Image (cartoon, rainbow, N blue to C red):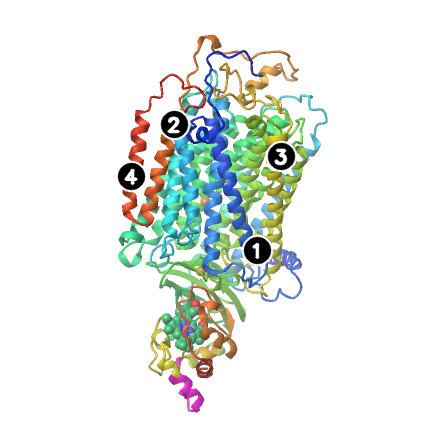
């Protein structure tokens, strides 16, 4: 019952925020007040409780402050009011009052912390590796590796094992719950569970270099059936092209520096610096959520990555436009 | 209230001319150097803020991107913390604390000068990084491994390391001086229990710095060794641990927050009673809550690290200690409000800023609670919510109190009043600007926007908040322009202030404006917490103004010879030596030797200078 009330309050607050938004751009809000997981839900509820407590305190204290200033505003600067130095009962009262509020806040904190800390035992492990400036996802049970887009079955708890190749990153998808840092030498664990099918925006939350702003991610929560199908398609090696145009593209890819950094299973490309491209065409975005995955965008990307993403580890390779077009055609065939 | 008997052999140093400023050991001139230096860096840091906000005015903007953005961001934070708020407060403390104590100077005048030179040269040093190979770009808390090699290859981080340490040396010198001065050089009758709250907070701050700074000194030196000698304190691949940096940094970094807020609270605690024409309500509670905040400040550092994967029990413990701090903070806010209650409130600029401070600091305090609640912190740490929160503490809090202090003490420092109408304009622009700039940050953080991003995607619903925030920043910039105009106009054209323009309570109002080098002709005797009020009013519940009462002097003027130390070049020489060494550590170790020679020359000159010699006549440096 309480939780139902809280939900109303939350939507109330969400509406206040939403009404502040300009028209048309509120569809994809990655707001912590639009939770779709049990953990994010608990966190949002706690947020709400603290929100209303702090609003109450805020109103009382600010009102007392402004009331005193207005009510006791003096006309004659010479007048001397009664000289009052203090009051012990008042000091005791206003020491105790915040202490009591904080006891409540602390108990709530502790309860939520306990309730959300440990992943359920049957959770599915995914190894998340942070890289400047993209995410590698390895599904340990399914032996599937992909980048930047995390597919999850709806309603199934997932255990993310967080590691980093380089600097500290922080994995955060607000609607699925709080963030956790990826720190060299430590393997942190973050568990999530998406209760509603959909796509959820996420973003690296720890300054990790020039393109920290461009290290985004997307969680795609889908039914178990769709998820299994996706796993199956990801497991297969890349399609071998027969169309001469695509063959040309593949040969250009394999003949260039690309193979030093990228893996395409089923070819000789086995690099590990950049994302696995075996099924790159199955992703809806490239460059860690920065660009929509269209042929035009991919061509722009391959032509000059640092111009799109400052500090990126993929260099400008000075390929001709024709070569780029061929490579893109090949990569876009890798469903 | 000062007596103006013809002076006898009063020492007079010239306060004009470049060499007088470069060699000064007078706490008032040093205070002014701090304030002017910090004022200059406020413009630099403010400009950086405007660049940042301009980039973020709309999604996918390309005005300031990538590494350059990160440089500006890092320098904005570092500048505002170390080169603006800290030295502003140190400057006010330098000028006002000895006056409040009835002292003739700080305990160690040359150490005092050394402190201000380390700050000014350190500020120049750090900012030169922009043109000498690029500024640091790893954020003001410079987390490793990003700040380590190979991820930050240039010299920016080395500049940052030695800049921070120069400020550290400056702050340690100032703190030692404050502690000794406050504990040893109080006027007769000025017991600790009668100290003005600003002096209490300055004392607490000095202790905080003495205990916190060693932590960052060690942290940065280890980072330098990692970067330049291939050591592995912070490198997991070499057996180190990047988390050690975070612990060491925040063991300094959180007390540092109180270093920036406590003296600001002290300023407010001075202004409120004077403009309410009442004593401070609950003096003891306010004084002791400052000390309590100081102690508790050392027990909360890991609340900056809730998302690094510490065990939930540890997180909960740090949440608990962080929440405890809310109690002394609340006590202060209640006592300030009670001070206003029942007063004869004079809505003049200093009071406006003091009330504005409380109003905005409440937001800072309340938003802090969200960050102490671990499960909420998991969501909003490293987002714009934190940026909003910290600006309500440091901008809405500290900086507005500093402006209040400037309006309050400007007459004492210059002998002229600041224009009050402009003061009101500046206040409202600042206050509304702070609401417009930082409330949207709180919201957009909850809406999922991480901090320190140079760009953001359209269609996430963040555009409007960023636009509003940028407009707020521009409004604040206008307010600062109004201040600058008021400052320079009043400096030359302001109405003469007289000794005690606000009908003040504390001893700085018992001397001339500006005070003579020796501060007080007669050392006053203190009988209560409001010595200057006592000279003016009868002491009953409804006091009447007394007329023509002179302060009681501890000793007769004729009996004392006032000794003041002679000016000295050595603090500056010493500081220049250290600055050259810092360049050496960044660029080439040979240069360190040059710096060392200058440094040793400074030390030997310093210790050999005869500070007890009879005064040199005006204008002659020593
Ligand atoms: Cu990042
Ligand atoms: Cu802190």
Q: Residues within 10 Å of mark 3 (few under 14, many from 20)?
A: few
As measured in the structure, the alpha-carbon distance from the residue carrying label 4 to the one carrying label 1 is: 43 Å
Give the label on residue B596, or none.
4
Q: If you read the primary sequence from the N terminus, does the residue marked by circle 4 or circle 3 appear first?
A: 3
**Residue located beneath label 2 in the image:** B568
Q: Is disc 2 in the same subunit as disc 1?
A: yes
Closer to us: mark 2 or mark 1?
Answer: 2
Q: If you read the primary sequence from the N terminus, does the residue marked by circle 2 or circle 1 appear first?
A: 1
Q: If you read the primary sequence from the N terminus, does the residue marked by circle 4 or circle 2 appear first?
A: 2
Q: Secondary structure at mark 3?
A: helix
Q: If you read the primary sequence from the N terminus, does the residue marked by circle 3 or circle 2 appear first?
A: 3
- The range drawn in magenta is A235-251
**Residue located beneath label 1 in the image:** B54
Residue B211: where, in percent of width, then height? 37, 36
Residue at 53%, 34% in the rendered image: B265
Work out whether A84 lies above or below A285. Answer: above
Q: Secondary structure at mark 4?
A: helix
Q: Is residue B516 magenta?
A: no
**Residue located beneath label 3 in the image:** B489
What is the chain identity of the residue bearing mark 2?
Answer: B
């Amino acid at each position: 019952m309480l939780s139902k009330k809280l939900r109303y309050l939350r939507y109330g607050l969400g509406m206040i925020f939403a009404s502040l938004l300009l028209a048309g751009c509120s569809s994809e809000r990655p707001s912590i007040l639009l939770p779709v997981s049990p953990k994010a839900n608990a966190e949002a509820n706690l947020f709400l409780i603290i929100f209303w407590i702090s609003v109450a305190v805020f109103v009382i204290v600010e009102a007392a402050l402004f009331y005193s200033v207005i009510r006791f505003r003096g006309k004659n600067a010479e007048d001397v009011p009664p000289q009052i130095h203090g009051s012990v009962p008042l000091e005791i009262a206003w020491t105790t009052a915040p202490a009591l509020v904080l006891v409540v806040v602390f108990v709530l904190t502790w309860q939520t912390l306990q309730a959300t800390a440990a992943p359920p035992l049957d959770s599915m492990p995914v190894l998340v590796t942070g890289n400047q400036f993209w995410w590698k996802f390895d599904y340990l049970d399914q032996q599937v590796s992909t980048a930047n887009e995390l597919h999850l079955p709806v309603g199934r708890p997932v255990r993310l094992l967080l590691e980093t190749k380089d600097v500290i990153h922080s994995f955060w998808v607000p609607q699925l719950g709080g963030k956790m840092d990826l720190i060299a030498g430590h393997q942190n664990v973050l568990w999530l569970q998406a209760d509603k099918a959909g796509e959820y925006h996420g973003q690296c939350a720890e300054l990790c270099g020039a393109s920290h702003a461009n290290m985004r991610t997307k969680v795609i929560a889908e039914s178990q059936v769709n998820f299994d199908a996706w796993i199956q398609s990801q497991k297969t090696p890349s399609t071998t092209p027969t169309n001469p145009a695509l063959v040309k593209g593949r040969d250009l890819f394999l003949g260039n520096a690309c193979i030093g950094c990228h893996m395409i299973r089923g070819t000789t490309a086995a690099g590990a610096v950049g994302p696995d491209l075996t099924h790159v065409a199955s992703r809806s975005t490239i460059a860690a959520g920065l660009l929509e995955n269209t042929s035009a965008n991919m061509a722009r990307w391959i032509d000059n990555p640092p111009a799109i993403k400052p500090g990126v580890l993929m260099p400008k390779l000075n390929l001709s436009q024709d070569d780029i077009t061929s490579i893109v055609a090949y990569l876009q065939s890798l469903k | 209230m000062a007596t103006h008997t013809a002076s006898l052999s009063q020492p007079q140093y010239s306060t004009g001319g470049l060499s007088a400023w470069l060699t000064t050991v007078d706490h008032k001139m040093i205070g002014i150097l701090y304030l002017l230096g910090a004022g200059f860096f406020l413009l630099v840091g403010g400009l950086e803020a405007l660049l940042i906000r301009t980039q973020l005015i709309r999604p996918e903007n390309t005005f300031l991107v990538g590494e350059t953005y990160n440089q500006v961001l890092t320098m904005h934070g570092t500048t505002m913390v170390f080169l603006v708020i800290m030295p502003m407060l140190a400057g006010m403390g330098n000028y006002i604390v000895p006056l409040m104590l009835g002292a003739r100077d700080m305990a160690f005048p040359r150490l005092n000068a050394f402190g201000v030179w380390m700050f000014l040269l350190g500020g120049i040093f750090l900012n030169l990084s922009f043109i000498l190979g690029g500024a640091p770009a790893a954020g003001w808390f410079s987390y490793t491994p990003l700040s380590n090699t190979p991820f930050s290859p240039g010299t920016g981080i080395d500049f940052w390391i030695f800049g921070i340490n120069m400020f550290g040396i400056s702050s340690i010198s100032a703190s030692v001086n404050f502690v000794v001065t406050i504990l040893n050089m109080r006027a007769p009758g000025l017991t600790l229990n009668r100290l003005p709250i600003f002096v209490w907070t300055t004392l607490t701050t000095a202790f905080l710095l003495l205990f916190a700074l060693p932590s960052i000194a060690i942290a940065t030196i280890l980072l330098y060794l990692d970067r330049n000698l291939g050591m592995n304190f912070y490198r997991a691949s070499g057996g180190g641990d990047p988390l050690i940096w975070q612990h060491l940094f925040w063991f300094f970094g959180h007390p540092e927050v109180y270093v920036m807020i406590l003296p600001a609270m002290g300023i407010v605690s001075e202004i409120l009673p004077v403009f309410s024409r009442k004593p401070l309500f609950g003096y003891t509670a306010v004084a002791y809550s400052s000390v309590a905040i100081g102690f508790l400040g050392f027990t909360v550092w890991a609340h900056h690290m809730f998302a690094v994967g510490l065990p939930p029990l540890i997180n909960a413990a740090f949440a608990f200690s962080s929440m405890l701090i809310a109690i002394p903070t609340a006590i202060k806010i209640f006592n300030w409000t009670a001070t206003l209650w029942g007063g004869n409130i004079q809505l003049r600029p200093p009071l406006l800023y003091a009330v504005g401070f409380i109003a905005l600091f409440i937001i800072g305090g309340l938003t802090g609670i969200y960050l102490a609640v671990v499960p909420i912190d998991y969501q909003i740490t490293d987002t714009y919510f934190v940026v909003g929160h910290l600006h309500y503490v440091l901008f809405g809090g500290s900086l507005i109190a500093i402006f209040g202090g400037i309006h309050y003490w400007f007459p004492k420092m210059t002998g002229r009043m600041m224009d009050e109408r402009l003061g009101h304009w500046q206040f409202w622009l600042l206050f509304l600007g702070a609401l417009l700039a930082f409330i949207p940050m709180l919201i957009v953080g909850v809406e999922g926007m991480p901090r320190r991003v140079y760009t953001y995607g359209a269609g996430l619903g963040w555009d409007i908040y960023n636009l509003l925030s940028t407009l707020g920043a521009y409004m604040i910039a206008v307010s600062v322009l109004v201040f600058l105009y008021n400052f320079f106009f009043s400096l030359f054209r302001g109405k003469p202030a007289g000794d005690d323009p606000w009908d003040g309570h504390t001893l700085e109002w018992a001397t001339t404006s500006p005070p003579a080098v020796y501060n007080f002709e007669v050392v006053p005797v203190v009988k209560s917490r409001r010595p200057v009020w006592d000279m003016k009013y009868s002491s009953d519940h409804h006091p009447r103004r007394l007329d023509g009462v002179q302060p009681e002097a501890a000793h007769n003027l004729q009996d004392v010879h006032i000794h003041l130390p002679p000016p000295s070049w050595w603090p500056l020489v010493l500081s220049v030596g250290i600055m050259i060494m810092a360049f050496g550590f960044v660029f080439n170790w040979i240069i360190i030797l040059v710096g060392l020679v200058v440094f040793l020359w400074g030390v030997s000159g310093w210790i050999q200078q005869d500070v007890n010699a009879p005064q040199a006549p005006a204008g002659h440096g020593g």
